[in-house]
Image (cartoon, helix red, strand yellow):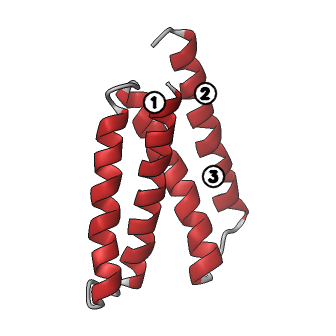
Amino acid sequence: MTHAWLLLAGAIVAEVVGTSALKASDGFTRLAPSLLVAGGYGIAFYLLALTLRHMPVGVAYAVWSGAGTALIALVGWAVFGQRLGPTALAGMALIIAGVVLMNLSSTSSGH
């Protein structure tokens, strides 16, 4: 199962790179960031597909989308100077809590 988590972590990182490059591509008018978008999403979906061989789709997708959402919000703050107010931070905490609960539920049910 550790292998599945490494694949999922790779999918999350690739998705965050792709999404960050999407912002930098300026509507696909800049070549290098546009290529990073295509590569990032391609790798992300490939690794997510491999993850699904070893992990329930509900858990994998929840972790992928939740972690990706939280990380891209942090990238937006750190790289693009976007503001993260208390409501956004609370939302990120709820996403993380939800992912943890789904993972615990999946583990306890034996799937």
Quarter of the image where one finds residue 81: bottom right
Q: Please state if 100 lies on the left or on the right of 37 as rendered.
A: right
Helix, strand or loop status at disc 3:
helix
What is the number of the mark on residue 101?
Answer: 2
Q: Residue furthest front?
A: 3
Which residue appears at 32% of the width and 85% of the height?
Answer: 32
Q: Earlier in the sequence, mark 3 or mark 2?
A: 3
Q: Residues within 10 Å of mark 3 (few under 14, many from 20)?
A: many
Helix, strand or loop status at disc 2:
helix
Could you tell me how far apart the alpha carbons at marks 1 and 2 are, in whole angstroms? 10 Å
Residue type of the residue flagged with mark 2: Leu
Image position, residue 60 (x, y; %): 43, 34
Q: Residues within 10 Å of mark 2 (few under 14, many from 20)?
A: few
Residue type of the residue flagged with mark 3: Met
Mark 3–mark 2 CB contact (< 8 Å): no
Mark 1–mark 2 CB contact (< 8 Å): no
What is the number of the mark on residue 92?
Answer: 3
Residue marked by disc 1: 59
Which residue appears at 48% of the width and 57% of the height?
Answer: 13
Which quadrant holds the C terminus? Answer: top left
Image position, residue 16 (x, y; %): 46, 62
Q: Earlier in the sequence, mark 3 or mark 1?
A: 1
Q: Residue furthest right?
A: 86
Residue type of the residue flagged with mark 1: Val
Which residue appears at 32% of the width and 27% of the height?
Answer: 53
Q: Please state if 89 lies on the left or on the right of 46 as rendered.
A: right
User: Above or below — where is 56 with respect to 95?
Assistant: above
Image position, residue 68 (x, y; %): 49, 54
Between 11 and 62, which is closer to the camera in this rendering? 11
